[in-house]
Amino acid sequence: MAFILLMVPFGYLAWMWNDIPGSVALHFGPSGAADRFGDKTDLLIQTIIIAAITLLAYVLVVNVHIIDKKRTKGVKPPMFDTIAFAAVLFMSIISTGIIVNGIYPESSVFEKMILPAIGMFFVFMGNVMYSIKPNRFVGVRIPWTLNNDDNWKSTHRLASKLFFVGGLLITLVSLGFKTEVAAMFMSAITLVIVLVTVGYSYIFYRNNKENKAV
C-alpha cells in the first residue's frame, strides 16, 4: 500500500504530461508564493527525489527496531508502521499537490490541499506522539530526551498536545483565510511548537540535574 501511494504522483504526472506548461512552480516560500520554477523535466526529477526520500524514511521507520536495537531492545515500537504509512500518504499528497499547482497555477491547491494536509498530519502526530518510545528516528530527538526516559516521556506528552491543537488551527486557518495568511500562520505555529517543546525539555533536564545535585 505504501508503494502504491508513492506511485500516485507519478501516475498523475504521466497522465497530464502533455498538458504541463513550459514553466511550473517547484517550490513555495513561507508566504505560500512560488519562489522557484522549472520545466516538466525538473518537475519529474523533483517528484523522484521526494519519492526516494520518502521511501528511505519509510524503510528506516519500519525497521527502527533492527537499526536502533540499543533503545528498542529489538522490539518494534507500537504505531511505527502506522506512522511510516501516514508519512508516505502525507508526502504523496504534497507531491501530487505540487504537480497540480504546476499544471494549474491559478488554482487554490496550496491553501486547499497542501496546507490542510500539513495540518492534518500534525493532528495525526499529536494523536500518536505521546506513545512513541525512545528511539533515534521518530519523535523529539534531542540530547535531553535521548539521554533520559522521563524527559522523553514528559516532553512527548506536551508535544502531543501542541501538535494536535496546532494541527487543528493550521487546518482551519488554511481553509478560511488567504494563502499568505495561512502560510505565515503555519510557519508561526510550527516555530512555537519547536521552541516550546525544546525549551520544556531543557528546563526538565536542568531541574532534574539540580535535584540530583541536591
Image (spheres, rainbow, N blue to C red):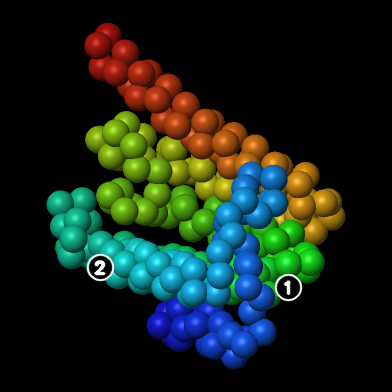
Q: CA distance from mark 2 to mark 1?
A: 38 Å
Per the rendering, the mark at residue 137 is none
Residue 88 visible (yes or no): no
**Residue 136, position in %: x, y?**
28, 49
Q: Residues within 10 Å of mark 2 (few under 14, many from 20)?
A: some
Give the SS element for disc 1: loop
Per the rendering, the mark at residue 104 is 1
The answer to whether 4 is drawn above or below residue 66 in the figure is below
Outermost residue on the front side: it is 22
Question: Disc 2 marks which amino acid?
Answer: Asn
Point out the image quarter for the N terminus. Answer: bottom left
Left or right of residue 211: residue 184 = right
The answer to whether 157 is drawn above or below residue 138 in the figure is above
Residue at (62, 62) in percent of width and height = 25
Give the SS element for disc 2: loop
**Residue 79, position in %: x, y?**
40, 66
Residue 182 visible (yes or no): yes
Question: Disc 1 marks which amino acid?
Answer: Tyr
Mark 2, mark 1: which one is toward the viewer?
A: 1
Disc 2: which residue:
63
Left or right of residue 78: residue 193 = right
Nearer to the camera, 65 or 214 = 65
**Residue 69, position in %: x, y?**
16, 57
Outermost residue on the bottom side: it is 15
**Residue 77, position in %: x, y?**
31, 62
Residue at (42, 22) in percent of width and height = 203
Q: Earlier in the sequence, mark 2 or mark 1?
A: 2
Left or right of residue 37: residue 204 = left
Q: Residues within 10 Å of mark 1 (few under 14, many from 20)?
A: some
Residue at (29, 33) in percent of width and height = 143
Point out the image quarter for the C terminus. Answer: top left
